[in-house]
Amino acid sequence: MRIGVAGVGRIGTMHATNLAALDRVDEVLLFDPVPGRAAQASAELKGTTAVEDLDTLLGGVDGVLLATPTNTHPEMLRAAIGRGVPTLCEKPIASDLAEMTALVEDVEKSGVEVLVGFQRRFDPAIYELNRRIRAGEVGDIYLVRAVGNDANPPDFSYLPASGGIFRDLLIHDLDCVPWLVGEPVVEVYASGSVLVHQAFADADDVDNAVVMLKFAGGAHATLAGGRHDPVGYDHRIEVLGSKDSLVAGVDSRTPLNSLEPGGHVAGPDAYPGFPERFHRAYVNEMNLFTQVIKGEVANPSPARESLISLRLAEACEQSRRSGAPVRIEGN
């Protein structure tokens, strides 16, 4: 199997490395719009070959991964599905809801498998959490709690183009939590503050935010996200149901200090960032992508479902600015 990777920045290089390590992948082809960048990456990554343009990449692969900037995703994705090439596209597949809706319709008309790279869906523990919920082992869901904190803020120059904390940081849980609950969100309330650095206010953004989701069946979820955690990168999801209470994201590297005798104490190897926290998820993502290409498993992150998280992110921003809950119609 030959897999292409378009975009060899940090995330694309990580994906290419994980793909090249899979036994069923014979070669990884690399392309980047920046001249010379793919060749440089290929020289450092065993099992990869650089190509000069997207057309050449798409003509020689069984599947392609898009890890270029968001504004290039629609054109590249349409090129891929036009060639009938199964695609895994980093989130978001488009920058606004109208453009994404049109793109999703094109994807579905093509019949080509397109996966969206929401890595939480591929995390083994969260994947197992979803399986247990679907199997009825958790019972009726009462409450979901999700925490997602960066260890350190992103580069401040990135903030004006980030889309804001709900579209950038919390978008992952706005995808994952409804996926776990399996019901439509009917109401959103969000609040945020600038507590870490004035740069966030200058970008018309916040650096700490809390979201409450109400689901059609009456269950609630609380999502909290922040741009600085002095102990390390932290992401956890807890689900409380009528039969069980489960958590994903608590292990020996969780950046959390307990005050209970014999309780958890964060060590020097606490997760420094999302690549380390979700390493297993990213490896699993590449493996599942190859399985989808082969028709061995169903698509675990289809394009249409990515509309849900963007719609919720926009509702969160509206709620934060207005100070009022936002009803979600037809979600």
Image (spheres, grey):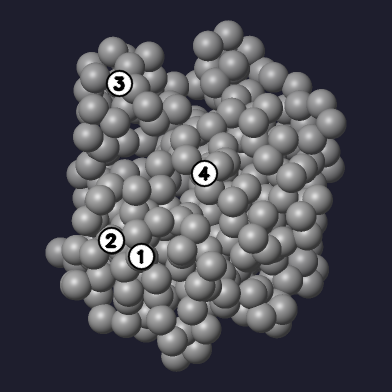
Q: Which residue is label 3 attached to?
A: 200
What residue does disc 2 label? 38
Badge 4 element: helix
Name the N-terminal-most of marks 4 and 3: 4
- Nearest the viewer among 149 and 39 is 39
Q: In this view, does 318 lie to the left or right of 254?
A: right
Crowding at mark 4 (Cα within 10 Å: few <14, some 14-19, many 20+): many
* Residues packed near mark 3 inside 10 Å, few (<14), some (14 to 19) or many (20 plus): many
Q: Which residue is drawn at 65% across and 74% down?
A: 292
User: Label 4 amino acid?
Assistant: His
Name the residue that disc number 4 marks: 73
| Real-space Cα separation, disc 3 to disc 1, in angstroms | 39 Å
* Front: mark 4 or 3: 4
Q: Where is residue 279 in the image (x, y as percent from the top left)?
A: 37, 68
- Give the residue at mark 1: 51
Answer above or below: position of 62 versus 255.
below
Furthest residue toward left:
268
Q: Is residue 221 visible?
A: no
- Measured from the top left, where is residue 159 in percent x and y? 32, 27
Q: Name, please, the residue furthest toward the bottom.
A: 23
Left or right of 182 on screen, residue 57: left
- Residue 170's label in the rendered image is none
Distance from label 3 to label 2 (Cα)? 33 Å
Circles 2 and 1, Cβ within 8 Å, touching? The answer is yes
Residue 237: image x %, image y %? 53, 54
From mark 4 to mark 2, how far is it between C-alphas? 18 Å
Give the crowd class for mark 2: few <14, some 14-19, many >=20 residues within 10 Å. many
Q: Residue at 23% x, 17% y: name it.
A: 198
